[in-house]
Image: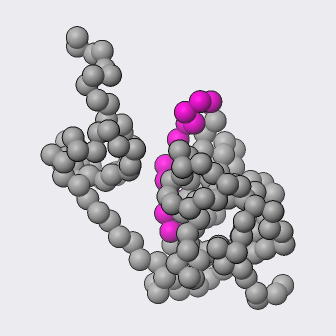
Amino acid sequence: MSNEFQFIREVSPGTTGWTVKVVVAEKFSPRIAQKSPTKYKNLILMDSEGSTVQATLYDQNITSFQEELILGKTYLISNTLVKLTSADYRAKSGDVQWTISGRTRVRHIEENNSNILIFTYSFNDLEDLPKYMDSNIDITTRTPALSANQQSAVTDFFLVKAAYCCFGR
């Protein structure tokens, strides 16, 4: 196998015979599509230039790749479906999305990623939520736990504007 890899920026719809070396920079929780019962999970992959691409797994592929594509690990990835995506369906910036399926070749390689993988977090106070309510952006908040035990879980929740809610009225 050749040691030549492409960078994320070099892969576009129609590109063939490519392999990109990436780090799994972010993993999102699986979700259900807005207009169908399809389950999907987004990942953000980063190359050594710092370029990122959204990669999406659907339905059974979420389970198939559960033991692979570990956060912070390096992989050689090729043979994904590369397509243009609209802003409505983007987890992050960028106009292409890779769809990872059973045809995708994923190979883990041992590599120290401390030089390119830097996590940054920006937290918002709960009191600041009203200023985001009419926007379509992701925000992260710190909230106190109602109870604590030995287990922990990440939970996604949605805030709904009271005008759209009929509970208690």
The answer to whether 112 appears left or right of 102 in the picture is: left
The extreme left residue here reads 127
Judge whether residue 21 is colored magenta. no
Residue 124, position as x, y percentages in the image: 23, 55
Which range is magenta? 24-37
The answer to whether 75 appears left or right of 147 in the picture is: right
**Nearer-the-camera pick, 48 or 61:** 48
**Nearer-the-camera pick, 94 or 38:** 94
Instruction: Quarter of the image for the N terminus: give it.
Output: bottom right
Whether residue 87 is visible, yes or no, is yes
Residue at position x 83%, y 68% from top?
16
The answer to whether 62 appears left or right of 107 in the picture is: left
Residue 84, position as x, y percentages in the image: 67, 54
Residue at position x 60%, y 44% from top?
40
Instruction: Quarter of the image for the C terminus: give it.
Output: top left
Q: Is 105 placed above or below 34 here?
A: below
Residue at position x 76%, y 88% from top?
3
Whether residue 20 is visible, yes or no, is no
Q: Is 62 placed above or below 123 here?
A: above
Count of all numbered marks drawn on residues in the image: 0
**Nearer-the-camera pick, 50 or 118:** 50
Residue 138, position as x, y percentages in the image: 38, 50
Residue at position x 35%, y 43% from top?
135
Residue 90, position as x, y percentages in the image: 54, 52
The answer to whether 162 appears left or right of 109 in the picture is: left
Quarter of the image holding residue 104?
bottom right
**Nearer-the-camera pick, 122 or 115:** 122
